[in-house]
Image (cartoon, grey):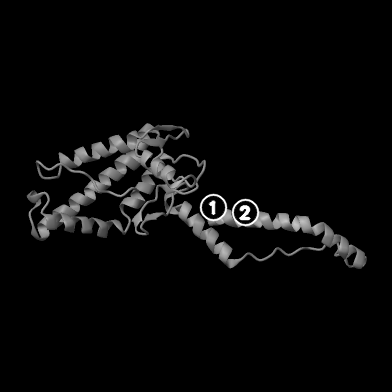
Amino acid sequence: MIRNPLALLLVVSCWLCLAQAQSSPSQQGGTQAASPQTQPPQNAPQANPPSSPQATANKDKKDTKTTGDSAGTGTSNDRLFFTLPNFLTLENAGQVPPLTTKQKYAVVLRSNFDYVQYPWYAFLSGISQAENSEPGYGQGWEGYGKRFGAAFADGSIENFMTGAILPSLLHQDPRYFQSGHGSFSHRTFYAMSRNLITRVDSGKNDFNYSEVVGGAIAAAISTYSYHPKGQYVTTTTPGV
């Protein structure tokens, strides 16, 4: 099943070209026999057919989804549930060049301060306050503000550790390349395995130190720095 609309359009176009190529000899022969002097001159300019507005819009939409201009080539504008930024996920990317260190930091920065992140952390902080988790923060607006700041710091530290700092030091690719083929179970297993396996800048697969070790470092920094003592922190940050 073809999931890419542009690929489907290409297949249909090729099929139409083949059908036209098979029928054109007989049509040309009948035309020459009926009116041999009505052939257009060879040097006559041929106007290019106008592009379909719908096809142009679909192409622009696909290009926008697969490449984020504000973060450089090789990232996306994808969002989880059409809201949470998921800019490091690529669909049908194939072989793409690795991200530079600047691009890795740029896409994490763009995702970390995306406008959707603020209500997301506000929502998480409200749940934390309602459950009175980490009671050392207290209640009221002061406790809510502390929880909001801690949630935002937790997400920022984890995003930069797993998406920029360690990937730059270890030359690993922080992006997630979706598998567009195979059965549902195959694609599910592939998605789960990407937590432990990632692509390095050379194109080969390697253990995902950036995700595993980076997440552990982020949790340790959060737990032993600004969170109340005696509270173990597990981050709830969506992937960038």
Total numbered labels placed on residues in the image? 2
Q: Mark number for residue 2?
A: 1
How far apart are labels 2 and 1 at the CA level? 10 Å
Residue type at mark 2: give it: Val
* Circle 2: element type: helix
Local SS, label 1: loop
Residue at 31% from the left image edge and 54% from the top image edge: 113
Which residue appears at 49% of the width and 46% of the height?
Answer: 181
Q: Which residue is mark 2?
A: 11
Q: Is residue 176 visible?
A: no
Q: Nearer the viewer, residue 125 or 160?
A: 125
* Residue 71 at x, y percent in the picture: 42, 50
Residue drawn 18% across the image and 49% down it: 150
Identify residue type, mark 1: Ile
Horizontal and vertical percent position of residue 5 = 54, 57
Quadrant housing residue 231:
top left
Few, some or many C-alpha atoms within 10 Å of disc 1 (few <14, some 14-19, many ≥20)? few
Give the image location of residue 239, x and y in percent: 33, 48
Q: Is the Cβ of the residue at disc 2 closer than 8 Å to that at disc 1?
A: yes
Which disc number belongs to residue 70? none
